[in-house]
Image (cartoon, grey):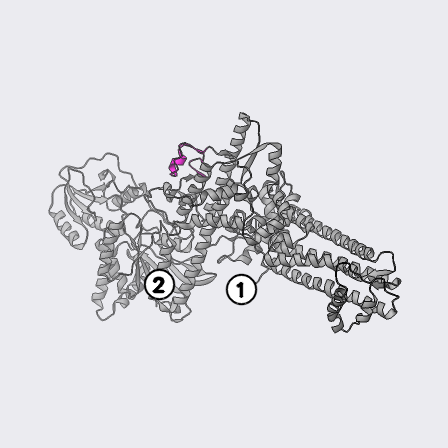
Amino acid sequence: MSVKKHTFADLVRIEQVRKIESAKAEDLSYASIQELPRSANGDFNYADFIQRLNTRARRLIQENTLNDALQQPQLQFIRARRICLGAAVILGGLAASQAVGDYSTLNIYWLLAVLLGFNLISLLLWLSGITLNLQSLSSGIAAQLASWLPYRHKKDPTVASLASHAWWESCLTGDVGKWRISVLTHKFWLTYLAAGMVLLILLMLAKQYNFIWGTTLLPDSTLPKLTQILGAPLEAMGLKIPDDPQTVASRIGGGKQDAETRMAWATFLIGALLVYGIFPRLVVLGLSLVMQKWSEYRFKLDLYLPYYIELRQRLMAREVKAEVIDADPQAGIKPAEVTLPPANVAIPSNAQAFGIELDQATRWPESLTCRLNIVDQDSHDKAIILIKSLNGPLLLGVAAHRLPDRGVQRLIKELVDSSNGKPWLILLSKPSAPVANAREFAWFRLAEACGIPAEHVITQ
Amino acid sequence: MNVRNPHRLHTDALLNIAVVGHTNTGKTSLIRTMLRSTEFGVIEDAAGTTRHVEQATISADNEPILNLYDTPGLEDSRALSAHIKKLAAKSRSLPPVQILEHFVTHVSVNDPLEQEAKVIRQVLRSDILLYIIDVREPFLEKYRLELDILTQSAKPIIPVFNFIAGHDRELAIWREHLAAFRMHATLEFDTVAFTFEAEKRLYQKMQTLVESHYDRLQKLIDYRAKLWSQLCLSGAKRVAELIVNVACYRESKAAKNNLIAHSLIEDRLHDFVRKAEQRCLNDLLSIFNFSEKDVAIQKIPVSNGHWQLDIFAPGILKAYGLDVGSAAAKGAAAGAGIDLMVGGMSLGAASALGAIAGAGWSTFRRYGDEIKATVKGTQWQCADEATLQVLYLRQKHLLRKLMHRGHAAQDTLHVDKADSEKLPDDWKKLTSALRQNPAWQEPSVARNNNPQYQEIEARLVGALLEEGAN
């Protein structure tokens, strides 16, 4: 495994640069990335590629002073978070003070319902949203609004709006977004509960409250029983909670309360807020933070995007290292110029035609008959004997579409040397195999090397 | 001088593979294809283009696997054979391999057989020989002699048939002749019409010949297979992106039936489609590392990086087997109204629940524009069905071409059968779903996480790769 050298922030920055480049490439200057080191040797490696993208992005950002624009959305998010948390403090405080009211009595279950009830509902919604993977359940209204941001498209985007858009898209959508918004939600509720609890403690420090409870619909025994159930974990922790007589005595309209009962209720109230409100929120907040980090760690760029594909070719083009291990002693020597044969050279009369490695499909001009096709040593030897005994010009037919090699050249040279007169060469072509200019040239060069004059080369 | 490779005894030494053959049979092309690089060596339609021995290493994930050696072509095997026979006659007691060694150590720089000596020298240093055959050539004595000499080196030889496309008869003849040399394990590897399967078989053949390198070669095969499928997937995804991009595109127009406004919109739409297709073409060529020259070789109807035939040109529908009564794609079509069944949020129990929970808001988010448009009385113009179809078929055809090429330069007579491409089965469903989701036009994390989008993309990619893969 390669070591991960980049952070989530790097990836977000790369994405932001991508967005800006895709819409505003012509506004950027690219001077600083000109001399970016050429491609790495070896095969493609994701971490290396990201590293290179990152270097490139940093240079572009620096050159075009995009830094402020790129950081703007993050700062906005932090600001929005502060506002959210501020609102949570106010709401928590308000809830607590509302529940307490101006009286010297404190309705215990009403207070718990206000502070913990909504919290519980939101927690349950979040849990079901996370388990069923439904974004709309797990995030609250504010978060819903925030998650809408990535869908907003501007008609004429500016660099700043593109940067924000890219930031929203990478940080507020997908897995990362899900957990980031979860973290925000939990922080909100945590602040709300903490604010409520602190206010309550302050109030209880400064004022004396009688704790009461009451119900209209439920049987009288329900709430004392609930107190026992809710109190069990608190008792286990060594806190003193109201016992049965104390609970019964605190029913609304009951008599005066003694200090011990008040103390027990106060402990119960604070304990319940801690155990059922703040503690679970802390746990899920911790979980969400871990998950956010994890999903940020797992966040990958979509390298199938054309933008990255193009950059991948540019930044990661692989160079093949080849090495000449047995050099050509004649390297660099240019072949001599060839004289082109004149057009429409007539076939000499009474020519003695021989074929050189011809295949079945090769056609001779009608006036000629091939005496022998040379394909191996035997036919070669036979041809030499024949040529020596023949009168009339020697005409060698070669397949123009085939490539003359040194073997063929040597063979032709031997035939030419054994003939008495000036030999001729004819380039035979067949309709199924078109002849390239380079091929004809190769044959002309061969003719020259074998001592066949250019005016003795017949092309068809 | 000892020509044996000093590293040969080490088990961790790389496998050395010499690519040999007659001149101009495509040795360098084969190596280029295996290296995936057009930069290796020089390729020309002439004898003796490569006149030195050049080494390149193939690696898998940065681990070197084997060395390839490009050798000069054997040009005068008759002289070479005669020379070696003479040497053999002089020293009868020597085994055939040592005669070859004697030959390469004693050849002078100016010897006419110097080039052949280079080949034999490399042959003796290598573990496997790839003997490249141009099947269009008749089986001549000179090729028989080449094989004779190469067999004398006592190295395993894998004959590789090149330029096989359309030369079945010639291929059969070559097979017959090679059988006489007890060479049955041949390979068809067309450097022009490259298929990944053929390359894989080449490495598999090597595996059977050198057991000690089995695992390493397997690693190479696996690595190459992975890269290849990634490459094809990149290409297919790019095409899918284009289809999505165009299908999701819409232009709003005022309800008044104004002819001038309509033609303006049509122009804008045409322009958009052309540009989108052009970008896709550039990206595809770049993904597959295709140069201008490769484009020409593969007979891709592209010149100077542009399609030769405009997408709205007359006759294009017919060229892609679409006969819909009109000769050209018109481009624009009136957009459909809100269709919750098609464009709606993807169904499935969980999402349905989510949809209910956030119905009001999501619906507005999704259909806000449409509702607004309905109120205002504006209409949409989308790319019409024929345009989308041609777009898809053309890209699919291109993709298939790109997936079957080699880094070789050669003339072939490829018959262009563009009309053999087919649309995916549920094409209509896919495109109408796309049309209903204009927000998908640009890539975004949200879009890519949308299950309905994922399904559509998977369908398109699957259909694009379906026939192209084999």
Badge count: 2
Neighbourhood count class around disc 2 (C-alpha, 10 Å): few under 14, some 14–19, many 20 upward: many
Q: Nearer the viewer, mark 2 or mark 1?
A: 1
Q: From the viewer's perspective, is A130 left or right of B397?
A: right
Q: Can residue B262 be seen in this view?
A: yes
Label 2 resides on the chain identified as B
Disc number placed over residue A1 in the picture, else none:
1
Comparing A199 with B310, the one in front is A199
Measure the C-alpha gap from mark 2 to mark 1: 29 Å
Residue B308, magenta (yes or no): yes
Q: Position of residue A340 (x, y in %)?
A: 29, 38
Q: Mark 2 points at which residue?
A: B206
Magenta stretch mostly in which secondary structure?
A: loop
Q: From the viewer's perspective, is A46 left or right of A451?
A: right
Q: Is mark 1 on a helix, strand or loop?
A: loop
Q: Is residue B1 visible?
A: no
Neighbourhood count class around disc 1 (C-alpha, 10 Å): few under 14, some 14–19, many 20 upward: few
Q: Height in image: A444 above or below B254? A: below
Q: Position of residue A314 (x, y in %)?
A: 52, 49
In the image, the segment drawn in magenta is: B305-329
Q: Height in image: B427 above or below B221? A: above
Q: Position of residue B315 (x, y in %)?
A: 39, 33
- The type of residue carrying mark 2 is Met
Label 1 resides on the chain identified as A
Q: Where is residue A332 in the image (x, y as percent from the top left)?
A: 38, 50
Comparing A189 with A426, the one in front is A189
Q: Is mark 2 on a helix, strand or loop?
A: helix
* Badges 2 and 1, same chain: no
